[in-house]
Image (cartoon, helix red, strand yellow):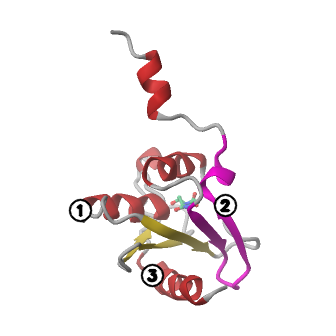
Amino acid sequence: MNDLEQKLFDLAVAHLKDAYAPYSKFHVGAALMTASGKIILGVNIENSSYGATNCAERTALFSWVNQGLTNDPIKCLLITGNTDRPISPCGICRQVMTEFMAPDTPVILTNVKGDFIRSTVDRLIPYHFTEDDLAAGTNK
Ligand code: THU
């Protein structure tokens, strides 16, 4: 990992303890950095109605929106968990990444052991749904 990735990794690992995961007991942490250097963290937040659960990477992305940072582009997103292989983000999170991150933005998949895969948004979710598809199909 390079220096930025290592910094995001250390913060995401340290944040794992804050995951709210009483049902799965599976803690996930995420950390993103913006162009201006701001760092936003996220953890998974579960619910007794399991479908209402929010993944760690979505928590970080929604927090970036909520903090009014949509004009400060995301330069890197890192995700970690106690998995054997570097963690694989779910399909919903991949779709949400496309909403807020440029296609070539690095997404670093890691596990707490430090194994990592450098991917990008477009490699994680090719042929994703977009606002153009929505506009083309809207009944007018
Ligand atoms: N989870 C994440 O937060 N991110 C991922 O990339 C994979 C899955 C969470 C959702 C749920 O709280 C738990 O992990 C088990 O699926």
Residue sitting at 23 percent across and 62 percent down? 68
Q: Quadrant of the N terminus?
A: bottom right
Please determine whether, in this image, residue 60 is positioned above or below residue 52: below
**Other-residue count near label 1 (Cα within 10 Å), few / some / many at <14 / 14–19 / ≥20:** few
N-term mark: 1 or 3:
3
**In this picture, residue 41 sits left or right of residue 30:** left
Picture coordinates of residue 69, whole percent (x, y): 28, 64
**Gap between marks 1 and 3 measured at Cα:** 22 Å
**Gap between marks 3 and 2 measured at Cα:** 18 Å
- Residue 121 falls within the magenta-colored stretch: yes
Which residue is denoted by mark 3 in the rendering?
Answer: 15
Please determine whether, in this image, residue 122 is positioned above or below residue 7: above
**Residue 140 or 79: which is nearer the viewer?**
140
**Gap between marks 1 and 2 measured at Cα:** 28 Å
Which residue is denoted by mark 2 in the rendering?
Answer: 88
User: Which of labels 1 and 2 is toward the front?
Assistant: 1
N-term mark: 1 or 2:
1
Residues in magenta, as a range: 105-126
**Residue 86 or 132: which is nearer the viewer?**
132
Picture coordinates of residue 109, whole percent (x, y): 65, 69
Residue sitting at 64 percent across and 37 percent down? 127
**Element at label 1:** loop
Which residue is denoted by mark 1 in the rendering?
Answer: 68
Residue sitting at 59 percent across and 58 percent down? 104
